[in-house]
Amino acid sequence: GAVVSQHPSRVICKSGTSVKIECRSLDFQATTMFWYRQFPKKSLMLMATSNEGSKATYEQGVEKDKFLINHASLTLSTLTVTSAHPEDSSFYICSARDAGASGGAAETQYFGPGTRLLVL
Amino acid sequence: AQSVTQLDSHVSVSEGTPVLLRCNYSSSYSPSLFWYVQHPNKGLQLLLKYTSAATLVKGINGFEAEFKKSETSFHLTKPSAHMSDAAEYFCVVGDTGRRALTFGSGTRLQVQP
C-alpha cells in the first residue's frame, strides 16, 4: 500500500528556533499534500494544503509566515515552524493523495506517522 | 461547508461483544466518508471509505460501515471486539472540491477483557 513518511518523528527545540518537518510519499507521486495539527486528546485540524509547484493554501487562522510550507517535488513537502514558541508544541501530521489514482481511490489520503514537536 | 459529529467521545465494550461507533455528517455535496483508526504513538490508518458506490462498506479487521443518506449517518460496526481494537477512531468527511478532509472529534474505544 501507499506509504508516507515523516522526519523527524520527534523534535525538541529551544524557543525562538526554527524547525523543519519533512513529509515524503515513498511509492507514489503526490501533487497535493496536507498538513494537520493534533492537540493532546483532540482531533486533527487542517492547517494547510500543499500544492506541488505553487503556493500552499492556508486555513483560516493559520499564520502562513509562521508555518512555511514548501512542496518542491512530487514526493516531498516540508513544513517549517519559524521562531517556534511553547504554544507551537503539538503533533504535526501530513497526508498525501496519490496523483495517479482515479475514481474513489483518488479520494483516499495516506497519512504519515506524525512528528511530535516540543518547544522549551 | 461540511462537518462531522461523532456522538460518543468514549465507548467501552467487552471483548467478543459488538462495537458501534456513531457518526453523523453534514455536507453540501455527495460526500466521501472515511473511518480512520489511530493507535497510541502510531499513524492514522484507513479502516474503510465510502465514495458513492455500495452503501454498505467493508473495511479491514472486520469493520464495516453503512452510509444512510436519509439519516446522514455513517456508523462504524464490528460484530465482535478484540483487545487489539482499542484505539481512537475518527469519522472523516471529504470535500470533493478541495480534496481536504474534515475530522470528527474522535471516539476512544476501550475493550475490556
Image (cartoon, coloured by chain):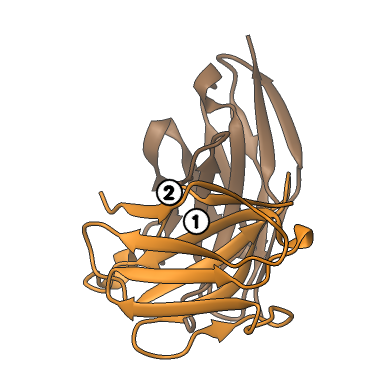
Chain colours: A orange, B brown
Seen in the image, is B102 located left or right of residue B78? right
Task: Identify the residue shown where x is 62% and y is 73%.
Answer: A82
Question: In the picture shown, does residue A25 fall above or below A58?
Answer: above
Occupied quadrant, residue A74: bottom left
CA distance separating discs 2 and 1: 6 Å
Is residue A85 or residue A25 the one in the foreground? A85
Q: Which amino acid does label 1 sit on?
A: Phe
Examine the image and state in which quarter residue B18 appears.
top right
- Residue B80 seen in the current view: no
Which secondary structure lies at badge 2? strand
On whether disc 2 and disc 1 are found on a single subunit, the reply is yes
- Residue, x 54% and y 22% (percent of image)? B81
Q: Residue at x 63, y 8 (%)?
A: B113
Residue ID for mark 2: B48
Residue annotated with mark 1 = B34
- Outermost bottom residue: A54
Q: Is residue B22 above or below residue A45?
A: above
- Extreme-top residue of the structure: B113
Q: Is B92 on the left or on the right of A86, as rendered?
A: left
Question: Badge 1: how crowded within 10 Å, few (<14), some, or many (20+)?
Answer: many
